[in-house]
Image (tube, grey):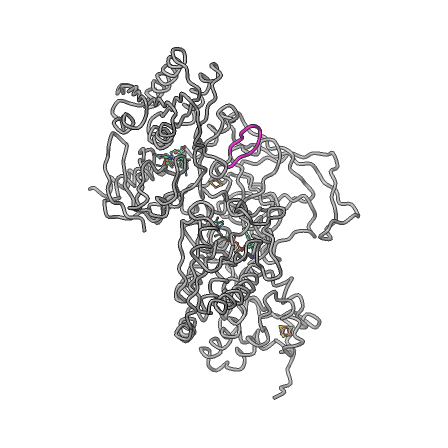
């Protein structure tokens, strides 16, 4: 199956994997994703190949530890273990075209998904600025970006341990929108691209909209198969129902029904919390 | 040897799990025959001559039904031999009898035509078929037959790629492997089986049965590449360069949605998503299995085919109150009779002549209710002979926190976008040999028919295998 060749925690809650998956490495293009199933009783989750080697047949993935699956992967998988399934590549490649000056934004681990696209855009002659806003201990791939794009801006937000996560995340959103506004006010950009939590995408879009700059967002609805079979990933775009896995994942931010998408991605939050709690309990039980 | 037969009018029933027990579990409902009961039922068959037997004519793949039934009676003192001979007869036409014995709409096919129906109950052909397959699998008989077949296969030195591991693809693969071709199946999901795996629930078709059907193929040398999506991981064009022929059995996987406001509210599932979460991902075992599914207190299933029954009965097993809402009347319900009966026994309610026009949500984007228009049948009939329906202008609102949409599916878009592939109304166009507009590329099953049945998909798989064999034989001869 799909052997884990290397693995490391590169920053707080960010785990990097190099995985043998020749069928994906051979074909994958920037903007595409894979569906990973790591365990026999596990979920199918979409992840984005960040780098790959077509000859050697590997891809790299970065997971942000969010819930049970990404946590289990971090805890239970060792180098030499295998992912049960890596299906793909899926989704449409990002369009490779002359866009001019591009601002490519990543919030949290979203930045790693920006990498293959930003790099490819830069390579075909666009002038790409990447902006990474996240908590201070979660900054990743700084050097990679500095090598790959025209300019890489990192805006680390300190974590306030006296406040809860929700409050802290509001600070990230605040810094994100402020920084985007500052950039758009002081410089000219022809195109904006963003990956990150849907709420943050919407917040950034509202700023970008004021400037009337075209914007694309890679959407992250909840997926199951990733092949257009289930309809879980449906989003309303321009008044039409689209399946993000086969029509996207990139869409015109001006056409996305953001509130609907935010509601849909939160549908299982209570169950996800429950799964996580049970898992933590089991972990604690196991350690005694 | 003409034996005078006593006509036994009543069917030997198959035991079923009691309703109270089964609405709480996903364990199979029908328990099937024992050998003794199977023989008793088999004895009722009149053994109509092969050329006449109407049951054979009703079977889409023309299984020699009296032929296999007679073996059970003939060798009744030697169950092993009886079943082995019977299985051999079935395998000549059908390589997945444990599946078809469970899911074929027998009442509209073989059993519909059975002459016993004129004097009493029709022969329980489906359950007999299932019995033969189950007994053979459980007692090593299948293995024995395979052991005899495999060494006799003569390798042809040509290869075939199959797209999709549903009944069409699996059947084509099995036939071609037996004919000596190197066969590789490309399957998008992580488990082969198609609808048998992700759609039809465990309580109707246990997944270990599908897995054993697949193990059989592997013994015949078929290679299965899961996680490979044709159109993304590899294209049809690339397959044609690597293989001597290609068969497309990619099914009709894309769910059809209802064009009504509120369709993307939380709580509205397509049947595909709901059943995939429940069956393939085992969401009924959450949180032991990681994939969640939400079944509210009140579930409305829209549609009345097999898919709707499966979704409704699955939802019942989560303890929900379930209503099947259908825009036509009871006579037009297309699900298998047994499934409708089981659904009713299990407490599923039916609401006929209602058509959804709006999904109503709360401020959080969660579904609250469905607004339906009441429909009325008129005398005029549509192409399929069903009575047309018209709106009455009267509306009814049904409260629901979950809706499951089961109104049909389209073929997979990733395949039908293949350049040069002729497609009409979303279905791949084939000639009488099941060859598509691309030479060397064949297709069958739901991909060419839209939504059909397991047995029709398998029939296509067989026919295509035959056509591919002829095509490749010609190719071999030209190159010789
Ligand atoms: C096209 C695409 C590419 C992605 N690429 C990456 C990536 O490179 N790195 C990364 O860390 N994350 C990526 N994600 C998000 C990733 O799939 C989720 O973080 C992951 O599923 C969380 O699983 P969990 O069990 O750890 O968390 P959970 O506790 O199950 O869920 C936490 C949150 O993650 C989201 N989520 C849960 N299940 C799914 C699912 N099946 N599909 C999509 N979202 C889900 C929901 O918003 C949910 O509220 C991508 C998502 C999409 C759609
Ligand atoms: C819930 C449900 C209940 C049903 N109940 C019955 C019943 O009781 N009796 C009956 O006779 N029929 C029933 N049917 C219909 C029957 O299941 C189908 O007609 C039959 O499965 C069609 O077989 P197929 O091989 O053509 O396609 P499928 O079974 O759909 O298999 C297609 C396979 O191809 C794969 N695939 C698709 N696209 C690609 C791609 N691009 N690359 C690689 N792989 C791909 C899919 O993942 C899938 O595994 C039911 C259907 C459903 C959904
Ligand atoms: S028609 Fe009925 S009685 Fe006649 S052979 Fe077929 S199953 Fe037996
Ligand atoms: S994830 Fe199932 S249709 Fe997109």
Give the side of residue A78 with respect to residue A198, left or right. left
Identify the residue at the far top of this view: A186
Task: Check if residue B392 falls in the magenta segment.
Answer: no
Residue at coordinates 31% horizontally, 48% vertically from top-left?
A: A2
What secondary structure characterizes most of the magenta part? Answer: strand
Task: Classify the position of ligand 1 by quadrant: top left, top right, bottom left or bottom right.
Answer: top left
Above-or-below relation of A25 to A197? below
Residue B367, horizontal then vertical, whole percent: 54, 32
Q: Position of residue B179 (x, y in %)?
A: 47, 69
Magenta-highlighted residues: A235-243
Q: Quadrant of residue A125?
A: top left
Q: Quadrant of residue B147?
A: bottom left
In the displayed structure, does residue B473 sit left or right of residue B148?
right
Picture layout, residue A79 above or below residue A176: below
Mark yes or no: residue B20 visible.
no
Q: Is residue A180 above or below residue B470?
A: above
* A165 vs A9, nearest the viewer: A9
Picture coordinates of residue B208 (x, y %)?
42, 59
């Amino acid at each position: 199956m799909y052997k884990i060749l290397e693995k490391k925690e590169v920053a707080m809650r960010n785990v990097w994997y190099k995985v043998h998956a020749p069928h994906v490495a051979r074909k994958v293009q920037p903007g595409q994703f894979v569906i990973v199933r790591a365990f026999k009783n596990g979920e199918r989750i979409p992840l984005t190949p960040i780098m790959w080697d077509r000859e050697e047949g590997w891809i790299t993935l970065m997971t942000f530890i969010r819930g049970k699956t990404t946590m289990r992967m971090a805890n239970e998988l060792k180098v030499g273990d295998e992912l049960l399934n890596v299906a793909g590549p899926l989704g449409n490649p990002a369009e490779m075209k002359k866009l001019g000056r591009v601002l490519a934004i990543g919030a949290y681990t979203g930045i790693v998904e920006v990498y293959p696209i930003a790099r490819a855009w830069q390579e075909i002659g666009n002038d790409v600025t990447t902006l990474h806003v996240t908590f201070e201990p979660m900054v990743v791939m700084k050097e990679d970006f500095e090598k790959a794009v025209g300019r890489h801006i990192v805006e680390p937000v300190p974590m306030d341990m006296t406040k809860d996560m929700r409050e802290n995340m509001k600070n990230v959103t605040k810094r994100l929108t402020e920084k985007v506004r500052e950039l758009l006010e002081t410089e000219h950009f022809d195109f904006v691209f963003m990956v990150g939590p849907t709420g943050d995408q919407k917040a950034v879009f509202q700023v970008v909209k004021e400037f009337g700059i075209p914007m694309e967002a890679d959407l992250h609805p909840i997926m199951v198969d990733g092949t257009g079979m289930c309809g879980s990933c449906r989003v309303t775009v321009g008044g039409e129902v689209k399946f993000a896995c086969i029509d996207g994942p990139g869409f015109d931010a001006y056409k996305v029904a953001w509130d609907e998408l935010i509601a849909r991605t939160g549908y299982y939050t209570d169950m996800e919390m429950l799964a996580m709690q049970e898992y933590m309990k089991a972990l604690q039980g196991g350690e005694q | 040897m003409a034996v005078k037969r006593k006509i036994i009018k009543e069917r030997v029933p198959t035991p079923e799990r009691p309703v109270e027990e089964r609405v709480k579990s996903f364990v199979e409902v029908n328990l099937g025959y024992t050998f003794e009961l199977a023989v008793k039922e088999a004895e009722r068959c009149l053994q109509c001559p092969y050329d006449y037997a109407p049951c054979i004519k009703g079977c889409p793949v023309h299984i020699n039904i009296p032929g296999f039934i007679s073996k059970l009676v003939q060798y009744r003192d030697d169950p092993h031999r009886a079943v082995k001979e019977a299985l051999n007869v079935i395998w000549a036409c059908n390589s997945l009898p444990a599946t078809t014995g469970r899911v074929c709409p027998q009442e509209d096919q073989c059993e519909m035509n059975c002459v016993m129906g004129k004097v009493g109950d029709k022969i329980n052909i489906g359950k007999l078929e299932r019995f033969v397959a189950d007994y053979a699998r459980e007692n090593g008989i299948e293995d024995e037959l395979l052991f005899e077949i495999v060494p006799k296969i003569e390798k042809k030195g040509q290869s075939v790629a199959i797209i999709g591991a549903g009944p069409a693809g699996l059947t084509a693969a099995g036939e071609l492997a037996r004919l000596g071709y190197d066969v590789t199946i490309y399957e998008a999901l992580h488990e082969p089986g198609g609808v048998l795996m992700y759609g039809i629930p465990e309580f109707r078709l246990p997944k270990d049965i599908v897995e054993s059907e697949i193990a059989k193929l592997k013994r015949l040398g078929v290679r299965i590449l899961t996680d490979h999506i044709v159109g993304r991981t590899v294209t049809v064009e690339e397959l044609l360069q690597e293989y001597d022929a290609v068969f497309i059995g990619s099914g009709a996987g894309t769910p059809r949605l209802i064009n009504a406001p509120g369709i993307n509210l939380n709580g509205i599932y397509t049947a595909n998503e709901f059943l995939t979460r429940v069956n393939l991902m085992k969401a009924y075992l959450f949180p032991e299995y990681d994939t969640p599914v939400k079944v509210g207190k009140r579930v409305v299933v829209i549609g009345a085919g097999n898919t709707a029954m499966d979704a409704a009965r699955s939802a019942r097993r989560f303890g929900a109150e379930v209503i099947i809402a259908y825009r036509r009347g009871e006579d037009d319900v297309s699900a298998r009779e047994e499934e409708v009966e089981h659904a009713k026994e299990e407490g599923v309610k039916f609401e006929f002549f209602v058509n959804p026009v709006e999904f109503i949500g709360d401020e959080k984007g969660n579904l609250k209710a469905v607004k339906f228009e009441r429909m009325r049948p008129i005398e005029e009939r549509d192409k399929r002979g069903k009575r047309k329906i018209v709106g009455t202008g009267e509306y009814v609102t049904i409260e629901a926190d979950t809706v499951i949409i089961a109104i049909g599916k389209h073929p997979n878009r990733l395949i039908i976008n293949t350049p040069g592939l002729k497609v009409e109304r979303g279905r791949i166009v084939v000639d009488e040999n099941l060859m598509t507009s691309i030479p060397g590329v064949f297709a069958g099953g739901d991909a060419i028919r839209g939504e059909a049945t397991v047995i029709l998909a398998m029939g296509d798989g067989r026919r295509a295998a035959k056509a591919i064999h002829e095509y490749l034989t010609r190719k071999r001869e030209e190159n010789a």
